[in-house]
Image (tube, rainbow, N blue to C red):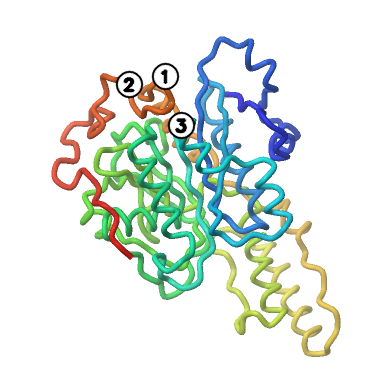
Amino acid sequence: MPIVAHNGLPAFQRLRDEGVNVLPPDRALHQDIRELHIGLLNMMPDKALAATERQFFRLVGESNPIAQFYMHPFTLPALERGQAAREHIDRYYDTFGQVREQGLDALIITGANVIGPSLSTQPFWQPLIQVIDWAYEHVTSSLCSCLATHAVLEFRYGQRRTPRPSKTWGVFPHRLVDKLHPLVNDVNTRFDVPHSRWNDVSRAQFEAAHLRVLAESDVGVHLATSPDGFRFVFFQGHPEYDTISLLKEYKREVMQYAAGGRTDYPPFVGNYFTARDIAILREYRGRLQSSLDAGRDIPVFPDELLTLGLDNTWRDTAHAVVGNWVGLVYQLTHSDRRRPFMDSVDPQNPLGLPGHAGPGSTPGRPQSR
């Protein structure tokens, strides 16, 4: 399933360098294969903007060899950006107006950094609601990642996330609770998923909203869908993460401690570091603390010593779920990407699932804020 490099976005070349199949536009035009247009609403902060592009492009591009993919990244002007990020966005990103006019077959909505547990007070809240409303009416399926999941559950289903006692941070074993849903076809019944979040929407809240829970773990629901089974797909974890993503987060937290940005030393990321890694990190903590006490320069973080020992135990499942999602979009979407479904598809039960949705199947209208 090749991604088509339809502009000069640097992520395309980075993916080529990693061995991902990326087609130039002239070759794409000579292949008799249907194209799909997938939007990426990238709300991540500046430092994570390009990495998030690559993570989701890679998941789509490696998931299923049935189509050519045109990826359309866009963002929300209400998000604060530095000059370099603004230039990147102005050069390579579509606007929401362009996406809305041209249409999409599918949409991925990323997480974002927020201050405090409340989402409705964030500057991006109302613009995000506009995107979600439009997507529900015009896009075959929207895949929501972490904070985007929390936003849709609050806005459309009245289920507000709640703070957790401590950060859920690590790689956790999950189990399927609905083994028959097409999204988890051929997925292992037990699999790992990374999480990195301070807040949670509980299993009881998903069920109160009549949502379909497909996979969960001891740290909560990971995978669920809207009552119709497909219009919205929800992740609470981060299956798109690279092998080193949690290491980079841990390093950032350690550096914040070194700079006085947090008072406690960050705990180890759960189920992620090897025994050797932990020994290295404990030794580094001792050297860092000695340097801080003596007023010396901060020692270099041991990235290279740690990277080689890290395992990725979630990518195959991530590819399988996203591959199933893309395959279902391909089967259901209209040839006109401004229309969400083929004429024969029931929007309230697009997958033809038995015992579908019923009461509560149509999400509520936005609440005034």
Secondary element type, mark 3: loop
The quarter holding residue 274 reads: bottom right
| Viewport quadrant of the C terminus | bottom left
Q: Earlier in the sequence, mark 3 or mark 2?
A: 3
Q: Badge 2 is on which residue? A: 342
Label 2 CA crowd tier, 10 Å (few <14, some 14–19, many 20+): some
* Callout 1 crowding tier (Cα within 10 Å): few <14, some 14–19, many ≥20: some
Most foreground residue, 47 or 243: 47
Q: Secondary structure at mark 1?
A: loop
Q: What quarter of the picture does the N terminus occupy?
A: top right
Q: Residue furthest right?
A: 296
Q: Which quadrant would residue 253 be assigned to in this image? A: bottom right
347 up-or-down from 214: above or below: above
Q: Which mark is nearer the camera, 3 or 1?
A: 3
The disc placed on residue 335 is 1
**Mark 3 is on which residue type?**
Gly
User: Which residue is at the front of the view, 109 or 19?
Assistant: 109
Query: Mark 3 or mark 2: which is in front?
Result: 3
Point 70% across, 22% down: residue: 24
Residue plotted at (30% across, 45% down): 177
Q: Nearer the viewer, residue 201 or 243?
A: 201
Residue highlighted by disc 3: 103
Q: Are marks 2 and 1 in contact (CB under 8 Å)?
A: yes
- Image location (x, y in percent) of residue 330: 42, 24
Q: Residue at x 67, y 75 (%)?
A: 256
Mark found first going from the N terminus, 3 or 1: 3
The kind of residue on which mark 2 rests is Met
Place of residue 93 in the rendered image (x, y in percent of width and height, measured from the top left):
62, 42
Label 3 – label 1 distance at C-alpha: 11 Å
Numbered tag placed on residue 184 in the rendering? none
